Image (cartoon, rainbow, N blue to C red):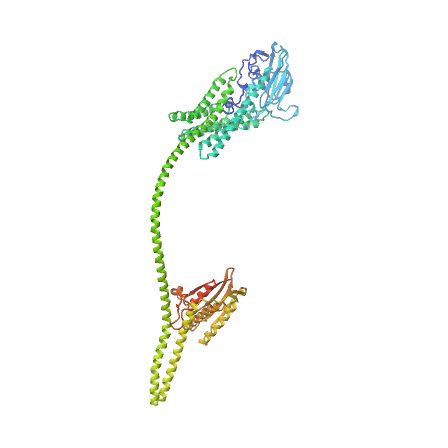
Amino acid sequence: MRHHWRALFFTLSPTFFSLLLVSINSCDGQDSALLLSHSMFSKDFGLILIAEANGWLFKSGNDTGWAKKDIDITSWKKLKPTEISDSLADKLGKAEGWFRIKVKPDSSFRGEAIGFNIDSWAATDLYVDGKLILSCGNTGINGKPFQEPRRHINSQVYLNLEAGDVHTIALHFLDYKAPLPPHHLKTEDLSLQNFIIITSSRFIEFLAKTIKEANTYNSIWVSVCVVLSLLFWLLHFQNRNDKNLRLIAISTTCYALGIYFATDQNGIGISYCRFAVGNFANGFFFGLAVLIIPVILANIFERKITRIVKSFLLIAFVAFMITLFLPKDPSLILLAISILSLAVISLYYIVSSWKKLKGAQWIIVGGVLLSLLSILALIASGFLTKDGMPRFYYLLLTSFLLSIPFSLLIYVAMRFKEIMQEVRQNANKIVQLSEEKKEQAINQQKTLQEEVNRQTAEIRATLDQLKSTQLQLIQSEKMASLGELTAGIAHEIQNPLNFVNNFSEVNDELMSDLKSELLAGNTLGAIQLATTIQENERKITQHGKRADGIVKGMLEHSRTDKGEKQLADVNAIAEECLKLSRHNQRAEDRNQEVQISTDLDPSIGKIELVPQDIARVFVNLLNNAFYAVSEKMKEQPNGYAPAVRVTSRKTYADIQITVEDNGIGIPAKVKDKIFQPFFTTKPTGQGTGLGLSLSYDIVKAHGGEISVNTQEGEFTEFVIHLPA
């Protein structure tokens, strides 16, 4: 890890080696050797941090001859491995050089192997007395390309050194600047105190125990946070409207991811790329988890998050992330400021809400305070000691990591309990209100039932009255219709009867005059009177036939017997009726020429109908058409060409027969009355007003429709729709 403070605040990984500070005796002269004694080994860990000892010499470049014992070192300068920095790199970011130091084991090492351990991202070759004893990665030795080492793989070797003799330790390293800011050497991302250490036989046992203990705690931390995050997400999905649950789930998930990436950085055999990604991910997720805590506190304490607080939180998070890309000293300062800002905001919400806190809210306060106390205890007992980590390091670290997640779990559990109690109390109130409402509803139901019974009786009486009134109205309508029909019949018959009566009376008087003329012997006068009587008789006959036609039309209108339907060719019926009507028109006016045209669809074939009834419809419509063009011819004798056209079409739904003319048309004001009985636009004596009414009834009886499209003075078009 780049910085030990970040190791605590972000990764919280048990890196013990960087905390070991030992006093190493050394000489200032270049030819003097560092005296090694068993007493120099740390009591707990069995190692000597030789990288920080005096007596180291350094030279940039590479020459395998520099590993030999006796060489000219006048050009070498004093530099410890712990003083490595990016200033050693060239323009391409490559840093390569040699470190040398002389050591002299005392008699306490007699017969005991001494261990050499290297922990660095630099490719390293370790020589003792000119012999290569350990390579981590590949510096290019034996012509092989540069290869970055992987942590904790083949980084330990044991060697028996002759006690009392001076031995030369030469260390060749090759490193490159990191691609991300602050672009320092990759070696600086680890504790330089651990660049090279000398270990005793106890170190292996200590290392195995440490790794086992670290893996155990790491597994516990990750597992607990993962289980808690899954639990919180499950609760959130069951209660999507609860914003606090969502924030708690996000925070716990970030805790789990941050701890996972922190523990992954210390894994065996990882590459620098994986280490760097894990370092960034650890900082991002753990920083985000810590950032959300003040927001959760504000929501739980029902406090409003002001813009100033939001700005502080955002700045703190950005500062968190910037520390990942800064050199050591500025990074530590900015990190401390960020952590302090978040702690101050959290404490502000706790202190300002202290008097209003109740129930489950105290659990959150306890979790936050316990976490802060744990980190303070770690700093006080761990970083301020000179003989290593505190004995309860993992317990304090566990308290720091899990106190907030567990307090959130307890808070949620207690909050659900409080909610259930509130629900139970509300349910009791609702039950009580329901009973009261039920009693009120029963009373209202009785009142409503009485009102309904009263209104029902009134409605029934009103309904009976309405039925009686309806029967009276129907009877009145019938009588009115009958009176209107009778009046129409009487009016229509009265005219020809008046003519018959008048001419009969006239003839009676003429007969008396005829007798007088015959008795007087005035033959010529008698003949004239006889001629007049004969003409009156013809008029009597004419008006009698007219009355007879009216009666027959009424009989046709009111007859109840129906002809039987049969398959008939409607096109043939239309052509036959057209010929008949044309003959009638010629008989009345031989000089009038009417243009007749047909467009009959042969695909219609035969359909079921009553031929004589449909023929009567066609005759009525065609007679009206010839009458209309004849009347218009009288009005416009010059330049007018009368025309009558009959068409038929078969559609997917029905059969359409159209009778159209370019005659006088029908006035718009009477268009809606033309199918009424006894209504006619013809002068008195030329129509009974029953033809269109009868045609309408016949078409309806066939299950069809008849409509008219007309414009006064221009044309008239009757369209008959018959079922196919």
Q: How many marks?
A: 0
Instruction: Classify 83 as above or below 302.
Output: above
Residue in the image at 34% along x and 49% along y: 455
The answer to which of 641 and 175 lies nearer the viewer is 641
Q: Residue 576: where, in percent of width, then height?
A: 50, 71
Instruction: Classify 592 as above or below 531.
Output: above
Instruction: Classify 464 as above or below 542.
Output: above
Q: Residue 342: where, in percent of width, then height?
A: 44, 26
The answer to which of 694 and 598 lies nearer the viewer is 694
Query: Among all residues in the image, which is located at the extreme right?
Result: 142
Q: Residue 55: where, in percent of width, then height?
A: 57, 14
Whether residue 370 is visible here, answered yes or no, is yes
Query: Among all residues in the image, which is located at the extreme bottom?
Result: 521
Q: Quadrant of residue 518?
A: bottom left
Q: Is residue 509 left or right of residue 147?
A: left
Q: Quadrant of the N terminus?
A: top right
The answer to which of 347 and 485 lies nearer the viewer is 485
Q: Residue 159: where, in percent of width, then height?
A: 63, 16
Whether residue 259 is visible here, answered yes or no, is no
Residue in the image at 44% along x and 33% along y: 243
